[in-house]
Image (cartoon, rainbow, N blue to C red):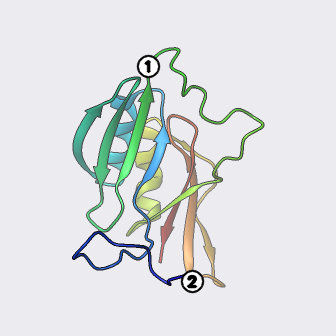
Amino acid sequence: MTSHPVAAAGNPPVKPHLDHVALVVGSLDRATHFYSHLLDLEVLNRVRLSDHTIQYLSSGTGAPLELIAYDEGAAGQPLNPPSMPASHHLAWQVPDVEDLQHRVIELGGLVISAPVYMPELQQTSLLIRDPDGFLIELVER
């Protein structure tokens, strides 16, 4: 067994890395507005597939955010029925959590708790829910 994935002829092997984060949302426009305005993400292309549409956003620092909206009654809905595992939360590092706390509400999100400083982690965290209910941690280091 080799320690690296097999690469295409002439290309170096690819090390495993985070490729993207995907969220299934109720409204692409609402979710795009929320994330682009709260986190200043760049709105990239929107791709239509057979039963869903993907909106790509980027912070310019790594893996893009994919917002996915399934067509009404598509086979992919619901993505996470109660018996299936699901992610707990996404965390975004930001310059100032207190500044963003006010913008969350303006953009249709919900603040779960006030910013909390955790000396063990040397960070301040703010827990919020986006307009689709995803738990998001905003982290200031």
Residue type at mark 1: give it.
Asp
Left or right: 7, with 100 as reference point: left
In this rendering, the count of numbered labels is: 2
Can you see residue 107?
no
Question: Secondary structure beneath disc 1?
Answer: loop
Q: Quadrant of residue 8?
A: bottom left
Nearest the eye: 16 or 25: 16
Residue 29 image offset from top left, x and y in percent: 33, 29
Residue 62 image offset from top left, x and y in percent: 33, 66
Is 3 situated above or below 64?
below
Q: Neighbour class for label 1 at 10 Å: few (<14), some, many (≥20)?
A: some
Q: CA distance from mark 2 to mark 1?
A: 43 Å
Which part of the image, by quadrant, shows the N terminus? Answer: bottom right
Left or right: 31, with 128 as reference point: left
Nearest the eye: 5 or 32: 5
Q: Residue 122 has which mark? A: 2
Is 141 situated above or below 52?
below
The residue shown at (50%, 84%) is: 3
Residue 112 image offset from top left, x and y in percent: 63, 49
Residue at numbered disc 1:
71
Residue 117 image offset from top left, x and y in percent: 61, 74
Q: Quadrant of residue 39?
A: bottom left
Farthest residue to the right: give it: 83
The residue shown at (30%, 49%) is: 57
Residue type at mark 2: give it.
Gln
Left or right: 13, with 114 as reference point: left
Question: Secondary structure beneath disc 2?
Answer: loop
Q: Neighbour class for label 2 at 10 Å: few (<14), some, many (≥20)?
A: few
Left or right: 119, with 130 as reference point: right
N-term mark: 2 or 1: 1
The residue shown at (30%, 45%) is: 56
